[in-house]
Image (cartoon, coloured by chain):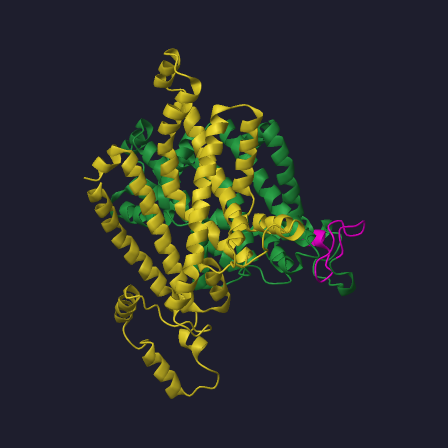
Chain colours: A green, B yellow
Amino acid sequence: MSALWFLWGVARTPRGAVSAVVLVLVIVCALFAPWLAPYEYAIQNLPGANTPPNATHWMGTDEFGRDLMSRIIHGARTSLSVAITAIGISVVAGMTLGAMAGYFGGIFDRVVTAVVDLTWSFPEILIALLLIAIIGTGTESIMIAIAIAYLAQFTRLTRAQVMALRSETYIEATVNLGAGHAHVIFRHLLPNAITPVIVAGMLATGDAIILEATLGFFGLGAQPPTPSWGAMMSSGTAQIFIAPWIILFPGAAIALTVIAINLFGDALIDALDIRNRLREV
Amino acid sequence: MLLFTVKRLLLLIPVFLAISVVIFMLVHLVPGDPIDSILRVGATPSERAALVARYGLDQPILTQYVTWFGKMVQGDLGDAIILRRPVADLIAMNLPHSLALGSLALLFSTVVGITAGALAAIFRDTWFDRGVMTLILLGSTVPSFWLGLLMIMLFAVTLGWFPVSGARTASALVLPVLTIGLGGVALVARVTRVAMMDIARRDFVMMLHAKGVSRWRIELGSVLRHAMMPVVTILSLRIGWILGGAVAVEFVFARPGLGSLLITSLNQRDYPVVQGCLLMLAIAVMLGTLLGDILQAMMDPRIREGMK
């Protein structure tokens, strides 16, 4: 309850308010797409192909005469579900690995740190492409690829938080009172380490939306006729001379969503006063 | 300094080995038998066995790796399945284009990023600063391939200043460099700005002001100089990130290059080419990071001493 109250407080700052409105709009689109979209996203109407934006089709139609606005509303579903699921998996796995590495230390820590450092200098897109080469294309594949591509970031961040907390007096006291490892990690370390990781996860969701769109643009993600913002632009490149709106609107949807996520995340960082803890890594 | 470089190079060997193992395993981790994808339809079992033997797939996996690694070090990366040419030739054809694009984009990001960030810090809280901050926000949030498409629409289709795609003329480099550059500029400008504002608060800067040194001399001669350390650190950490941006942008502008080659072969499941491209890109990232580290050590003696 207090977390909700806190978010409400952030949403009342100027930056927070603008970004919160955009985010709520995108989330509502994703949740209620079938009811909000004016047309079916897969219905083709070849005589009405490449129609510019007008009163009946606010964002125009694509090369198959499908209503672009309906496809963008449904596309929010694909983009958000892939990005949020991927980052969710990545945060949970990264926190577990990072907490164990930071808490137990030793060989396990050294192996985890070595792998994390190895992947750290490589751009996420290269790691994702490598993984897609192994597990194949499609929505689930890019979800897994994105999750693994961001794993290093959350592992590193959690490990740094846990290392900083481990020598605190209250942790030592808990251990001396005879608490088990699981109790110390889950009841004391993680709750205190979680805030920066959640905020970093939120910011990474924005990057993940871009990565999903990029992979979709390459033709490696959702297969037609499933609408995804990246794939829509990919088929739109052939129409760039005659129907530029096919590229303009999905790209604007991505840009707006990601800018809103970044602004809200930034407002959150300021409100929580955790800029220094995020910079530790 | 030489000692530092040598030690840093030696550290890359285990990293390179680890990467080579992952890239080698790629073909073996792919679901299904790799032979099936190159075997023609209706082939007899003996033809199949011949192919298996030709690619050495009947050998133990470690032997296969050692053979592959030995050939790879000599520049033999196998043959492309779809394109039917040695992978090394394909890479040799595409690498110069990627190198030109990557290095120009890196140069552009560094020069423009440092200039914009420094001016924003000097003129903090003015319209110029706010303009740079907006550019930073856009540069780090707008997907690079969309930016590329927008540039094509505006500068190539509507205004006709630059070619839409390809790499036949030098002017075809302008839009791709700008596209990758904006993301890089955003990153460099943000770090420069924050670092300069941080250093401007230090005591020695206040001392210089008190001594009556002119403002520009302090900002450029002292503050900017000290702010270069974190900028170089971030650049060396994120150099691969800027180079990675080239992958998407090459594809958008239909330019030859390692990125487009990688995407095309991924879609065609041409695994030897995928392996070759990933290997080259990994080496590029490693060397880029190494360059950043050396630059950092040249600027900061503490890092050189720390390695001893």
Residue A206 rendering spot, x and y as whole percentages: 53, 44
For residue A22, side relative to residue B219 (left or right)? right
In the rendered view, would you say A74 is above or below B234? below
Q: Is residue B301 magenta?
A: no
Q: In the rendering, at what x and y percent does residue B27 appear?
A: 39, 68
- Asked whether the viewer can see residue B190, the reply is no
Q: Is residue A54 magenta?
A: yes
Q: Nearer the viewer, residue B271 or B232?
A: B232
In terms of depth relative to the viewer, which is nearer, B76 or A232? B76
Q: What quarter of the picture does the N terminus of chain B occupy?
A: top left
- Residue depicted at x 38% and y 11%: B210
For residue A4, above or below residue B57:
above
| Rendering coords of residue A12 (x, y %) | 61, 27
Q: Quadrant of residue B220?
A: top left
B112 w.r.t. B160: above or below = above
Q: Quadrant of the C terminus of chain B?
A: top left
Displayed quadrant of residue B39: bottom left
Residue placed at 55% from the left, 47% from the top? B143
Q: How many marks?
A: 0
Q: In the rendered image, which quarter is residue A260 located in? A: top right
Instruction: Evaluate whether residue A14 shows in this view.
Output: yes
Q: Find the magenta span and give its range.
A: A51-71
The residue closer to the viewer here, B135 or B29, is: B135
SS majority, magenta: loop
B240 vs B256, left or right, is left
At x 75%, y 55%, the residue is A39
Percent across and percent down for residue B12 are 27, 51
